Amino acid sequence: MTLRPFALVAALALAAPASAGPTHHRQPRAKRVLYDAPHASIHPTASIGHRVWLGDGVQVGPHVILGDRSSVDHGTQLGPHVKIGHDAQIARDVQLSPHARVGDRAWIGPHVDIAPHVLVTHDVRLGAGARLQPHACLGDRVDVGPQAVIGSHARLGHDVRVGQGAVIGAGAVLGDRVVVLPGAQVAAGARIPQGAVVGASHRRPRHRR
């Protein structure tokens, strides 16, 4: 049977037959990886779950873990020790740097840049072109709009909404259900209480003498 160009091809990585003598090499379990093109690169130390979909040009680095039914679109790069949860969807041309973690059912839009040691938990959505700087931490169900920036060591609680083009400064802490409107800025080190709405530049209050 001749396969059509760009057709979805199921590639079965079956365990090699056991040899007659003893061996020190562990045989891989049978797994199924779905490819849209043949140019995805998977490092031999990566762990790929069942029913994982990889697009053309995807690079899966050393010790990466891809959860079951996750999908990674064309041109995305997964650096060493990146961990992707079950049912996560990662769009095209995303950069995940070493030790970044993405939880179950997360949706990562195109051209997102996730720096080293970033933690993205479950059911998070990251809009196109968003940038997460080193050691940022996002709680469950956080929604980050396109082109927004989450600074290094910033911590976002559960159900936070960050609008398009908004900037969360380094080390800022946002409580649960905070809403940051499009284009707003949260200053570095700021503490935003749960349920607050940030609609303009949020600066640290000055102490009166």
Image: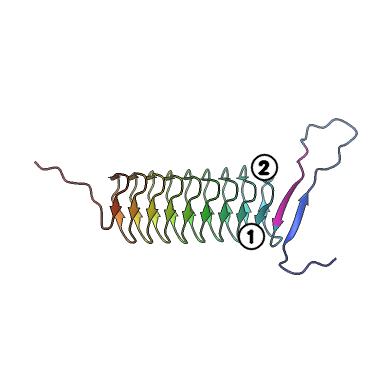
Task: Give the quadrant of the N terminus.
Answer: bottom right
Marks 1 and 2 sit apart, C-alpha to C-alpha, by 18 Å
Residue 25 in the figure: left or right of residue 162:
right
For the residue pair 38 and 8, the one nearer the viewer reads as 8
Which residue lies under the disc numbered 1?
Answer: 57
| Rendered residue at 79%/66% (across/down) | 3
Indicate the amino acid at tag 1.
Answer: Gly
| Rendered residue at 74%/69% (across/down) | 5
Which residue lies under the disc numbered 2?
Answer: 45
| Rendered residue at 83%/43% (across/down) | 16
Indicate the amino acid at tag 2.
Answer: Thr
Residue 114 at x, y percent in the picture: 48, 51
Of the two numbered discs 1 and 2 on the same chain, state the one appearing first in sequence: 2
Give the magenta range.
27-34
Q: How is the image coloured?
A: rainbow
Membership of 157 in magenta stretch: no
* Labelled pair 1, 2 in contact (Cβ < 8 Å): no
Q: Secondary structure at mark 1?
A: loop
Q: Secondary structure at mark 2?
A: loop
